[in-house]
Amino acid sequence: MPVTHDNPRPAGVVFALRLLWGAWLLGFAMAAADVAQLLGMESWLWIVLALLAVFALSALLVVYISEGRGWARWCYLGLFLLGRGFGLREWLLQFVDAPILGLLVLLQILLQVAALVMLFRLRESREFFMSDRAGLSRRRSTRTRRP
C-alpha cells in the first residue's frame, strides 16, 4: 500500500526522481546497445536475465522512493555503491576502448550521484522521508490489539 503524505512531494524530491529515471533510461539504452555483443557470448541468456533483473529492481526502488519509502533510498544507495565499486575497473577501461560509452557511463553516474545527494541532503527531502517513518509509527500505534 502506498505511503500517504499530508504534503505532496517536495520539488527537490521530484527533480531527484527525474534524475534517477534519466539515469535508468540511459543505462537501459546502453545495455540495449550492447545486446548484439552479448548474443555472441556462450552464456548470453544468463547475462540478459541478470541485466533485466537489475533494471527491474532499480525501477522498483525508484517507484518506492517516489512513494516516500525511506528504506528504498538506502537500498538504492547501497546498490549504487556496490555496483560502482565492482564496476570501477571496467568503467575506467571503457575510456580506452570506447570513450563515448565511457562518457555516457560518467553521465549516468553523475545523474545518480546528484539525485542521491538531493534525496539525502536536502532538508525538504529528509522531512519527506521522515514523514514515512512517522506515518508508519501512527499506523502501528492505531491498530487494535486482539485479547
Image: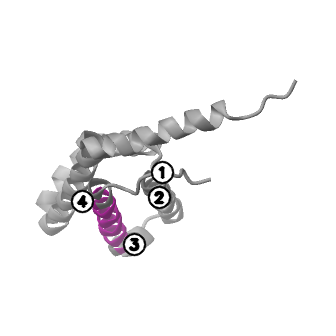
| Sequence-first disc among 4 and 1 | 1
Q: Secondary structure at mark 1?
A: loop
Residue 15 percent across, percent down from the top left: 27, 60
Q: How is the image coloured?
A: one colour
Closer to the camera, 142 or 11? 142
13 sits left or right of 63 in the view: left
Q: Secondary structure at mark 4?
A: helix
Residue at the disc numbered 1 = 5
Mark 1: give few (<14), some (14-19) or many (20+) Cα within 10 Å: some
Residue 121 higher or lower than 56, as above or below? above
141 sits left or right of 86 in the view: right
Amino acid type of the residue that numbered disc 3 sits on in the rendered structure: Val
* Mark seen at residue 108: 4
Q: CA distance from mark 3 to mark 2?
A: 26 Å
User: Dots 3 and 2: beta carbons under 8 Å?
Assistant: no
Amino acid type of the residue that numbered disc 2 sits on in the rendered structure: Val
| Sequence-first disc among 4 and 3 | 3
